[in-house]
Amino acid sequence: KGIFVFSPSTFSRVMVALAGSPLPSGITVKRSRRVQEALMVKGPGQEIPVFVDPMVILPLGYSLEYVTPWFGKPVPETAAVTPGGPRWESLLAWLLKRPTGSRYARRETARLMVAWGNRLLEKGLLFTASRFASQALYLQPQYEAALILNARVLLGSGRPFEALDAVNRALSRRASSWEASLLKAQILMAQVYSSLLEYSNHLRVLDEAGQNLLKAQKTGPQTWEVALAFTRLYILKGDAVKAREWHATTLSRSGNHEKVARALRALRKIPPQRAP
C-alpha cells in the first residue's frame, strides 16, 4: 500500500509515475493533500509508505528523498541522506530530454525542475539549485515559481540586489503572491544587513520590508516563516517590544520546534538600526 500526497499546483501524476519510473511494488494508490495526516497513517502492523509531490511543503523536521522525478519519500531530517552530484546531474539531464513541443509539456518540465531545485536549496546545494532554476526559466521565462526559486538562490549566494530584481519580476506576474512578498521582505532586510546599502537608506528599506510582510501576512497562511521575518524586522528597527511579541508568535506557530528556536537564537546577533 502507499499514499500519494499532491501539491494543489499539480495534476494527478500517479499513472505517469507508475508508467515512467519504477516505484516499490505492491503499491495501492491512495490520494491525500495533507502531509501530516499521511505520515500518521499506518497499516496492520506496519507504516504505509508515503510518496510526496516535490512541490509539497513538508512539515518541520522532514526532508524529501528522491524516488522518481514526480515523487519523493519524506524522511526525518536526522535520517536524511543527501545524494551526490551525479544523482542530480542525471535527473537534470533526464528532464532536459523530455519532449517540450507543447506549452503544457514545457510547463510540466519546468515545474519539476523548480520542485527539485527548491529541495536542493533546502539541502544547501546552491550551485545545483541554480542550474535547475536557470533551465526552468529557459523553458518558461515568466514562470512565477521559477522566478521565486531564482531569487532564493541569488539571496542564498549573497547577491540580494540581483535577488530583488528576480522577485520583483515574480510580483509583476502576480502581485498577490504571499510567497514572493515574504521573500521580497527577506531580501530587503538582507540588503540592510549587508554593507552594500547606503546607511541613509536603511529605515526606508526596512519600512518597505514591513509593508511586504504585512501583505504576506494578509494574503497567505499564518506561517512561522512570516512570524520569524517580523521578528527580524523589529530587531533591525530596534523595537524590542514588538520583536519579543513576534518571537513568541514564531515559536507558537512552529510548535516550539528546535529548528525554529535555533533560527530565533541566531537573530540575537543582528545589530539594530538607528536613524541616521
Image (cartoon, grey):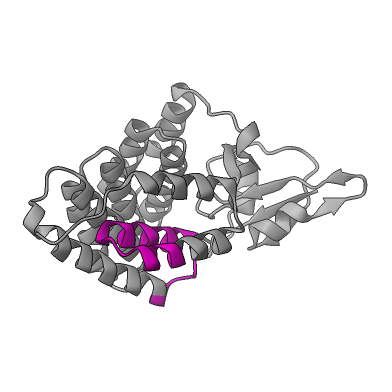
Foreground pick, 45 / 232: 232
Furthest toward the right, the residue is: 44
Judged left or right of residue 259, residue 232 is: left
Picture layout, residue 76 above or below residue 181: above
Residue 82 part of the magenta segment: no
- Judge whether residue 99 can be spotted in this image: no
Q: Which residue occupies 38% across, 49% down?
A: 110
Q: Which residue occupies 40% across, 72% down?
A: 217
- Judge whether residue 206 can be spotted in this image: yes
Judged left or right of residue 4, residue 248 is: left
**Quarter residue 76 falls in:** top right
Where residue 59 sits: x, y (%)? 60, 53
Where residue 143 sits: x, y (%)? 31, 58
Q: Which residue occupies 42% across, 58% down?
A: 228
* The C terminus sits in image quarter: bottom left
Judged left or right of residue 261, residue 273 is: left
**Quarter residue 142 falls in:** bottom left
Examine the residues drawn in magenta and state their main secondary structure: helix
Tally the numbered discs: 0
**Quarter residue 90 falls in:** top left
Picture layout, residue 15 above or below residue 69: below
Q: Which residue occupies 32% across, 54% down?
A: 148
Where residue 145 sits: x, y (%)? 36, 56
Foreground pick, 205 / 64: 205
Foreground pick, 198 / 152: 198
Where residue 154 sits: x, y (%)? 26, 43
Q: Which residues are magenta?
A: 218-246
Residue 241 part of the magenta segment: yes
